[in-house]
């Protein structure tokens, strides 16, 4: 009689995702993952052909986590790009290791930074349309300019150098939007 499988694909990914949240993607090795999942490395390599395959699925799980975070983020402004920026910065503040894995690594499993930000919901495209409706002549160029501010602020949070509160972050993004539109 075959032994019952005690660990599942989702179970391994759940443990690996918790490891990323706590320690970062570089902490996820087969041995460490097996120890955290209370199994040997054998079930991991029975379920995944290699660690690269597991990391790719883990990456997609992190992308979905980011998208859910952004979609559930409470809107704070009517100006284009401000809510996206606030959600992105807040995500970096609350999820440093996942943010680093998604947005500061060159290992994005075929996704560009734009793909990750735009997501399945097409949020960037919607914000660009919103800016055009508000009278912006070159909304794509405006996005690139304000994105530098947004991404820079979010990356500063990884090192503890970003210390603006929510009100000040909103003002920074609104002021940036207005300066770039003029």
Image: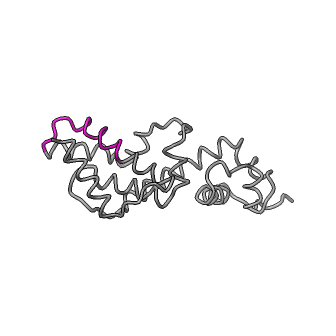
Part of the protein shown in magenta: 135-149
What residue do we see at 34% from left, 45% from top?
149
Query: Is 169 placed above or below 109 here?
Result: below
Taking depth in this image into account, of 81 and 49 the one nearest to the observer is: 81
Image position of 122 (left or right of 13): left
Residue 144 falls within the magenta-colored stretch: yes
Name the residue: 56% across, 54% down.
Answer: 97
Q: Quadrant of the N terminus?
A: bottom right
What residue do we see at 48% from left, 38% from top?
A: 111
Camera-side residue: 44 or 90? Answer: 90
Q: Which quadrant would residue 39 be assigned to in this image?
A: bottom right
Magenta stretch, main secondary structure class: helix
Residue 82, horizontal then vertical, whole percent: 28, 53
The answer to whether residue 116 is left or right of residue 138 is right
**In the image, residue 70 lies at what x, y percent?**
39, 56
Quadrant location of the C terminus in the rendered image: top left
Q: Nearer the viewer, residue 47 or 121?
A: 121
- For the rendered model, the colour scheme is one colour
Residue 19 position, x and y percent, is 64, 58
User: Up-down: is 109 above or below 173?
Assistant: above
- What's the residue at 39%, 53% (across, down)? 88
Q: Which residue reaches farthest left? A: 135
Q: Residue furthest right?
A: 1
Q: Tell me, yes or no, whether the highlighted magenta stretch contains residue 25.
A: no
Count of residue discs: 0
């Amino acid at each position: 009689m075959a032994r019952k499988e005690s660990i599942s694909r989702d179970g391994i990914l759940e443990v690996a995702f918790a490891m990323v949240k706590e320690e970062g993607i570089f902490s996820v090795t087969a041995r460490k993952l097996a120890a955290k999942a209370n199994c040997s490395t054998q079930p991991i390599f029975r379920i995944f052909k290699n660690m690269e395959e597991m990391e790719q699925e883990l990456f997609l799980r992190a992308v979905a986590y980011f998208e859910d975070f952004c979609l559930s983020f409470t809107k704070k402004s009517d100006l284009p790009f401000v809510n996206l920026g606030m959600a992105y910065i807040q995500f970096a503040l609350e999820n440093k290791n996942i943010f680093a894995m998604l947005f500061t690594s060159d290992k994005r499993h075929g996704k560009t930074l734009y793909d990750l930000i735009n997501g399945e919901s097409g949020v960037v495209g919607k914000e660009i349309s919103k800016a055009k409706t508000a009278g912006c002549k070159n909304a794509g160029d405006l996005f690139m300019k304000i994105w530098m501010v947004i991404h820079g602020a979010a990356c500063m949070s990884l090192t503890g150098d970003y210390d603006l509160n929510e009100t000040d972050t909103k003002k920074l993004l609104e002021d940036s939007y207005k300066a770039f539109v003029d």
